[in-house]
Amino acid sequence: MTLLFQITDTAHKLADTIKNAAQAAGAPKDEIRFGDLLVKGGWVMVPIGVLAILGLVIFFERYFTVRKASKDDSNLMIQVRASILSGNLESAKAICRNSNTPLGRMLQKGLLRIGRPIKDIEGAIENVGKLEVSKLEKNIGILGIVAGIAPMFGFLGTIIGVIKIFYDISATGDLSIATISGGLYVKMITSAAGLMVGILAYVGYHILNIMVERVILRLETDAIEFIDLLEEPSK
């Protein structure tokens, strides 16, 4: 009987040990917060964060500006055409002035040059068009710079992380994971953050350029239609 009690007691202890070990293995570890990861990246994360904010501000500001300029102006062309064919140039000028769009400003400049040779009118419209395109492209180049600089800061963080790893090893003589983990944090986090900001800025840069190119194509098409309209009475 005594032996049976000893075996039973041992089995219970073994079961408790296995249970406790399983609970310890399955216990949730402390979750790593995103903010803590950024802090681990060190001071290099500051310029990367500034570049990220700058890129977002420029992208959304230019996006809504270009989008506003790319709205359909077909109704404007119809009104201007009707006013010109009816001989009411002042009405056509007022329509263009009140539209407050790149196309409206281009057509208004052309209407102000009516009476001069067609080449002069084309030149005036082209000059205004260049100014309008320049306004649309404002600060887009900065987004391209952000796309190139951000990964460089990430690479700089990688170099700093490697330096930290070797410094810690030389200072402690310890090659354990605990010694090199700090440098690895800096290395991986800054690289990932720099690449992420660079990729987003690169994509945003090309999206804005595509939008501007579409606006340019539409302005050129409408300008040609306007010149053809002015030449119609002389045909």
Image (cartoon, grey):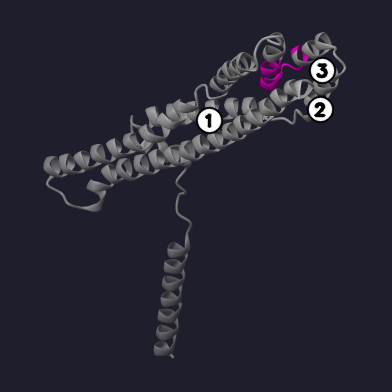
**Quarter residue 110 falls in:** top right
Q: Earlier in the sequence, mark 2 or mark 3?
A: 2
How far apart marks 1 and 2 lie (CA) works out to: 33 Å
Q: Which residue is mark 3?
A: 84
Q: Earlier in the sequence, mark 1 or mark 3?
A: 1
Task: Determine whether the residue tagged by mark 1 lies in a helix, strand or loop.
Answer: helix
How far apart marks 1 and 3 lie (CA) works out to: 44 Å
What residue sits 72% from the left and 16% below the top? 100
On residue 56, the disc is: 1
Q: Amino acid at mark 3?
A: Ile
Q: Amino acid at mark 1?
A: Leu
What residue sits 59% from the left and 25% below the top? 61
Q: Earlier in the sequence, mark 1 or mark 2?
A: 1
For the stretch drawn in magenta, what is the main secondary structure? helix
On residue 2, the disc is: none
Task: Determine whether the residue tagged by mark 3 lies in a helix, strand or loop.
Answer: helix
* Residue 104 is inside the magenta segment: yes
* Residue 172 is inside the magenta segment: no
On residue 75, the disc is: 2
Q: Is residue 20 above or below residue 201?
A: below
> Given this view, does label 1 or label 2 mark the residue nearer the observer?
2
Task: Determine whether the residue tagged by mark 2 lies in a helix, strand or loop.
Answer: helix
Q: Is residue 108 above or below residue 223?
A: above
What's the magenta region?
97-107
Residue 231 location, x and y as percent?
73, 22
Tell me, yes or no, whether the two marked residues, 1 and 3, touch with CB atoms within 8 Å.
no
Q: Residues within 10 Å of mark 2 (few under 14, many from 20)?
A: few
Residue 155 location, x and y as percent?
30, 39
Q: Amino acid at mark 2?
A: Asn
